[in-house]
Image: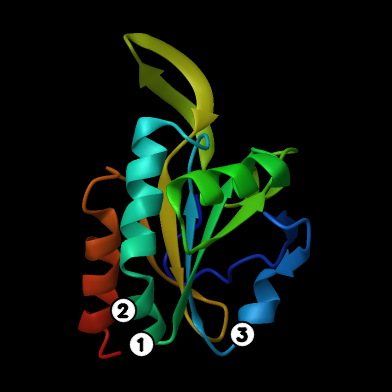
Amino acid sequence: MLKVGDRAPDFTLLDEEGKEVRLSDFRGKWVVLYFYPKDNTPGCTTEAKGFSASVDEFEKVGAVILGVSPDSPESHRRFKERRSLKIKLLSDPDLKVIKTYGAWGKKRSFGKEREGIIRSTFLIDPEGVVRYVWPKVKPSGHAEEVLKTLKELGL
């Protein structure tokens, strides 16, 4: 997993509208890059709704929110529409970005160990450097935790 001080690897992924989005498109802004397992599941919905509810506060401090999962752009579009989400969702079906950032690995679920998405978040500064990492996220209250961290940085 990437660490604080690492340069955030650039990437290009499709968003919910099928448009290419590059991390470098957001240079000059803070980026909250979060990885989640699957659209329309309880935890992922809680996390996405939390970020959506606070999107205006994130914008006030110059931050954008990007959610990444292996789901297709079409799945993301339906998820956004169904849940009235206000954040950008990116599709990584090959797991390339997910693995590059270290958000893929062994995890326990219902008593069984398997590989999958490790729910994690990276705070990237305007120069493209990782400034904070949440390696194992609990969906409820996470958006508030990230926003608090941004404000503690004086933004």
Going from N to C along the chain, the mark reached first, 3 or 2, is 3
Q: Are marks 3 and 1 in contact (CB under 8 Å)?
A: no
- The quarter holding residue 44 reads top left
- The quarter holding residue 142 reads bottom left
Q: Secondary structure at mark 2?
A: helix
What residue is pinned by disc 3? 27
What residue is pinned by disc 2? 57
> For the residue marked with disc 1, what is the amino acid?
Lys
> How far is mark 1 from mark 2, CA to CA?
5 Å
> For the residue marked with disc 3, what is the amino acid?
Arg
- Mark 2, Cα crowd under 10 Å, few <14 / some 14-19 / many 20+, is some
What residue is pinned by disc 1? 60
Q: Are marks 1 and 2 in contact (CB under 8 Å)?
A: yes
Up/down of 126 relative to 14, above or below: below
> What's the residue at 42%, 42% (across, down)?
119
Q: Nearer the viewer, residue 44 or 121?
A: 44
> What's the residue at 24%, 82% (across, down)?
151
Q: Left or right: 25 with respect to 146?
A: right
> How far is mark 3 from mark 1, CA to CA?
16 Å
Q: Left or right: 51 with respect to 7?
A: left
